[in-house]
Amino acid sequence: MSESGPFLNEDFFTRGVLLRRCVAWVVDAVLIGMLVWMLWWVLALFVLATLGLGAAVFAILPFVPFAYHMLSLLGRRSATPGQQLLGLTVRRDEDLGPPTGLQALVSTLAFYLTLATSGLLLLVALFTLRRRTLHDLVSGLVVVRVDAMEALTEPPPGWNMPFGTPAR
């Protein structure tokens, strides 16, 4: 979003995003923990049912957080459940469109690489324009408020009619 682009007031999109992202991260961490815990029990029952022969399936557990984040970014709302709960969405920086598959992959990889190196690199968001983290910068994404995005869109035709169809 350049100064000459249609989005001159960038603060409109990113006001309060940093605190919301932190709370969303906690919500997502709890949800991932619950998901891994439930999956562990399902896999344990599978291992018991196969008399131990299926023990290798436990190898999928470390990939659950990665899949959670990447698939969430590629979903309809382009946000993790925690981000959705706090009114955030992830968008391409250049045109506010939904992330591409490659951007979601790069963002997720960079996010977990950042966490693996103590997470201190997340502090980059305190010093960047639009409060972008390192994984946002590398992937070309930005986190914005959903209500700001909705202000850009016009209601569809017949939005105030029953079932969305205009009377004829």
Image: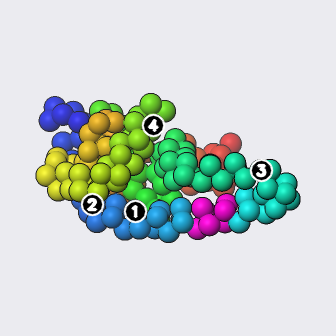
Q: Which badge, 1 or 4, is on the more N-terminal residue?
A: 1
Contact, CB < 8 Å: mark 3 with mark 1? no
Residue 113 in view of the camera: yes
Residue 147 as seen in the image, left or right of residue 166: left
Provide the residue span drawn in magenta. Answer: 34-40
Categorize mark 2 by other alpha carbons within 10 Å: few (<14), some (14-19), many (20+): some
The secondary structure type at the circle numbered 1 is: helix
| Residue at 53 percent of width and 61 percent of height | 32
Residue 14 part of the magenta segment: no
Position of 158 relative to 16 (above/below): above
Number of numbered discs on residues: 4
Secondary structure mainly formed by the magenta segment: helix
Q: Which badge, 2 or 3, is on the more N-terminal residue?
A: 2
Residue 97 in view of the camera: no
Position of 97 relative to 126 (above/below): above
Query: Quadrant location of residue 49?
Result: bottom right
Residue 54 image label: 3
> Which color scheme is applied?
rainbow
Q: Which residue is mark 1?
A: 25
Q: Amino acid at mark 2?
A: Leu
Q: Which residue is mark 4?
A: 105
The quadrant of the rendering that contains the N terminus is top left
Q: Which residue is mark 2?
A: 18
Q: Which badge, 3 or 1, is on the more N-terminal residue?
A: 1
* Image position, residue 107 (x, y; %): 38, 41
| Residue at 82 percent of width and 61 percent of height | 48
Tell me how far mark 3 sits from mark 1, CA to CA: 33 Å
| Residue at 16 percent of width and 48 percent of height | 128
The quadrant of the rendering that contains the C terminus is top right
Q: Amino acid at mark 4?
A: Leu
Tell me how far mark 2 sits from mark 1, CA to CA: 11 Å
